[in-house]
Amino acid sequence: FVYLPQTALHTPIILSAALADPILGICREKKIKPWIGCTLTLIILYIIWCTTYLMAPIPLLYACIMPPLILWSEQYDIPYIDDNARMILWPMLFVWLVQFSQTL
């Protein structure tokens, strides 16, 4: 599996991608206002990350920053990179940058 400094981060990152993408897709398909879909997705992402924070040893910073970062990565299109990949790559990049900045 892809290397992350804390193994407790694998589950919420994958779970976030697995739940956020279908919720936003259904909201777009049903022509629900975008802010409602984003709000619902953000609530679910915060539930995932706060639960992980309470049950596993991850920093509170991740529980606060990851949900908006994941939602942002789903919303904005980058050519040739699938939205599911972006929803996993951006959080991993953020974790790596935080870990790297702590080693300086």
Image (cartoon, rainbow, N blue to C red):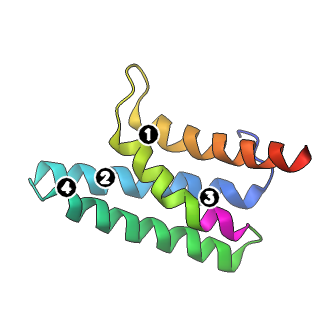
Q: CA distance from mark 1 to mark 2?
A: 10 Å
Q: Amino acid at mark 3?
A: Thr
Q: Main secondary structure of the magenta part?
A: helix
Q: Mark 2 falls on what kind of element? A: helix
Determine which residue is flagged by label 3.
11
Quadrant housing the N terminus: top right
Q: Amino acid at mark 4?
A: Pro
As drawn, 36 above or below 95: below
Q: In whole angstroms, how far apart are the C-alphas of marks 4 and 2?
A: 14 Å
* For marks 4 and 3 on the same chain, the one whose residue lies earlier in the sequence: 3
| Residue 52 pos. (x, y %) | 63, 71
Q: Secondary structure at mark 4?
A: helix
Q: Which residue is mark 2?
A: 22
Q: Position of residue 89 (x, y in %)?
A: 57, 38
Q: Secondary structure at mark 1?
A: helix
Coordinates of residue 74 in the picture (x, y in percent): 38, 44
User: The disc labelled 2 sits on which kind of residue?
Assistant: Pro
Range drawn in magenta: 59-63
**Percent x, y of residue 61:** 67, 65
**Sequence-earlier tag: 3 or 2:** 3
Tell me: 101 left or right of 47.
Answer: right
Do residues under tags 4 and 3 come within 8 Å of each other at their CB atoms? no
Mark 4 or mark 2, whichever is nearer to me: 4
Furthest residue to the right?
104
Q: Earlier in the sequence, mark 4 or mark 2?
A: 2
Residue 84, labelled with which disc? Answer: 1
How far apart marks 3 and 1 lie (CA) works out to 15 Å
Query: In the rendered view, would you say 67 is above or below 95?
Result: below
According to the picture, the residue beneath numbered tag 4 turns out to be 34
- Residue 78 forms part of the magenta stretch: no
Q: Secondary structure at mark 3?
A: helix
